[in-house]
């Protein structure tokens, strides 16, 4: 017996679907608003959710991320009004199983429900059979789980895969994960860095050469394509591949055949292709800098990796894993994380993504030395300044801008840290109490950084008593 939830403020529509479900010996609950639905979902696990778009307390589409984030998420069938094309499009992009136009016939509802239940049963069997070995992929956030689900499918097929994402999001790691969980795991994983291929030796590097093919070719040499025979060929930063090479490589992808430089005959290479890029290849096709036929060849499957700023929930797990790695590597004792350390990192925008996070952690550990806990004061000053800037914007509701000479200025509070009192305000000020709180918090944070957490130096420099200092730390949620 399966469990269904109907979320619709149309009582008659609810009763129609409920009658259909109960006749099939399944259990059914109803909710007539988003708040009622959330309560139900906290109390029960459901196999299928019928979700109306227009509800008294908001759009059902806004609830999709919450539903997708549930462990063993239910299949979602959207109920939408006729002519609501945008609703159907947003529903599909949100990962729903299907959508029904209201009013729908009993036959349409039955067919959609039966298909959803069959798909769910097959998916459960497939997931039991297709668990990945993930020693280095860290994270449980909904966005990374979506990427992992696609990775699982890619690992159990031999189709070409295109992995996209910003620099530092782990594209090569996911490519290796696919290879190591595939039927080709026993063969080579060959990396081709398209951004650094030497122009004069491109074909020799990729396809190899025979002895005497050119000056310096003293013996036969297999190229990277041949080395990947039976394994995986990973084209890193494929968007950097020159147009002249794209045409040559297209034929290699189609035929899996190539001719070494100076060779008299063609050779075969049975490789599986995975490509990665941080560029928008579709836009490059429109601009004429990337071949459309090559793009179609490399993106049979597509995996988009989220930026770290979109998976903040994974930061602590990523820090802990990297901490263990660094301590094992250098023979160090693991350090703890102060609350302000995590809060600061969660507020940062992470333009360099996971690669930057790893670098920042290592720098903080060096800065902390023998101290057993990492605090915000151990983080680089430029990172803390950016976070402070963000916090000021949130507190004042006003944007911080850059001046023509590179100085910082804001529309309400100008500059931060050491210069917070030095400049003149050039727009409406916040209330005095609000400004004093902002300035005081920034002063305390910089004070602790400059004094490296030494309480004696802090009290001497600030003129504060010990009790007053700790009262201020508690007031602003700061830690030593």
Image (tube, rainbow, N blue to C red):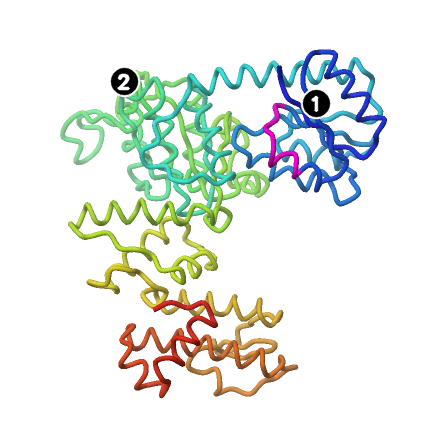
Residue interval drawn in magenta: 38-47
247 is within the stretch colored magenta: no
Q: Main secondary structure of the magenta part?
A: helix
Q: Is 53 left, or right, of 290 in this rendering?
A: right
The image quadrant where one finds the C terminus is bottom left
Q: Which residue is mark 2?
A: 264
Mark 1–mark 2 contact, CB under 8 Å? no
In front: label 1 or label 2:
1
Where, by quadrant of the figure, is residue 372 drawn? bottom left
Q: CA distance from mark 1 to mark 2?
A: 71 Å
The image position of residue 350, as x and y in percent, is 44, 55
The image quadrant where one finds the N terminus is top right
Label 2, residues with CA under 10 Å away: few <14, some 14-19, many ≥20:
few
Q: Which residue is mark 1?
A: 28
The image position of residue 280, as x and y in percent, is 53, 42
**First in sequence: mark 1 vs mark 2:** 1
Viewer-proximal residue among 197 and 10: 10
**Image disc number at residue 431:** none
Viewer-proximal residue among 121 and 85: 121
Viewer-proximal residue among 175 and 197: 175
43 is within the stretch colored magenta: yes
Secondary structure of residue under mark 1:
strand
The image position of residue 320, as x and y in percent, is 32, 47
Viewer-proximal residue among 211 and 190: 190
Give the residue displayed 37% in from the left and 65% down from the top: 376
């Amino acid at each position: 017996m399966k469990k269904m939830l109907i979320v619709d403020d149309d009582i008659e529509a609810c009763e129609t679907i409920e009658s259909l479900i109960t006749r099939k010996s399944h259990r059914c609950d109803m909710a007539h608003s988003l708040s009622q639905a959330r309560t139900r979902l906290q109390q029960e696990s459901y196999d299928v959710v019928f979700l109306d778009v227009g509800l008294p307390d908001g759009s059902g589409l806004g609830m999709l991320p919450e539903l997708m984030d549930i462990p063993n998420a239910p299949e979602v069938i959207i109920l939408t009004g006729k002519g609501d094309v945008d609703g159907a499009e947003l529903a599909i992009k949100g990962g729903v199983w299907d959508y029904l136009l209201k009013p729908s016939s009993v036959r349409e509802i039955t067919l959609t429900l039966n298909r959803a239940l069959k798909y769910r049963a097959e998916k459960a069997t497939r997931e039991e059979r297709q668990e990945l070995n993930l020693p280095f992929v860290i994270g449980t956030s909904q966005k990374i789980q979506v990427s992992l689900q696609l990775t699982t499918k890619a690992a159990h097929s031999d189709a070409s895969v295109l992995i996209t994402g910003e620099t530092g999001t782990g594209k090569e790691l996911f490519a290796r994960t696919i290879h190591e969980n595939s039927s080709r795991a026993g063969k080579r994983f060959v990396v081709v860095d398209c951004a650094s291929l030497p122009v004069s030796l491109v074909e020799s590097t990729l396809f190899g050469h025979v002895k005497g093919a050119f000056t310096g070719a003293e013996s036969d040499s297999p190229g990277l394509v041949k080395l990947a025979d039976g394994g995986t060929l990973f084209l890193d930063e494929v968007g950097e591949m020159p147009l002249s090479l794209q045409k040559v490589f297209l034929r290699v992808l189609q035929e899996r055949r190539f001719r070494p430089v100076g060779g008299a005959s063609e050779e075969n290479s049975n490789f599986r292709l995975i490509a990665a890029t941080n560029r928008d290849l579709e836009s490059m096709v429109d601009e004429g800098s990337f071949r459309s036929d090559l793009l179609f060849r490399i993106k049979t499957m597509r995996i988009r990796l989220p930026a770290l700023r979109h998976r903040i929930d994974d930061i602590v797990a990523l820090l802990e894993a990297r901490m263990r790695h660094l301590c094992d590597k250098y023979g160090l004792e693991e350090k703890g994380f102060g609350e302000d350390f995590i809060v600061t990192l969660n507020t940062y925008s992470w333009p360099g993504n996971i690669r930057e996070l790893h670098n920042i952690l290592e720098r903080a550990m060096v800065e902390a030395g023998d101290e057993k806990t990492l605090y915000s004061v151990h983080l680089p000053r430029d990172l803390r300044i950016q976070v402070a800037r963000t916090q000021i914007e949130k507190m004042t509701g006003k944007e911080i801008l850059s001046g023509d000479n590179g100085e910082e200025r804001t529309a309400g509070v100008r500059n931060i840290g050491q210069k917070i009192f030095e400049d003149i305000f050039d727009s409406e000020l916040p209330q005095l109490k609000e400004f004093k709180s902002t300035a005081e918090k920034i002063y305390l944070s910089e004070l602790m950084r400059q004094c490296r957490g030494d309480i004696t130096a802090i009290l001497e420099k600030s003129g504060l008593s010990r009790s007053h200092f700790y009262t201020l730390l508690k007031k602003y949620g700061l830690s030593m």
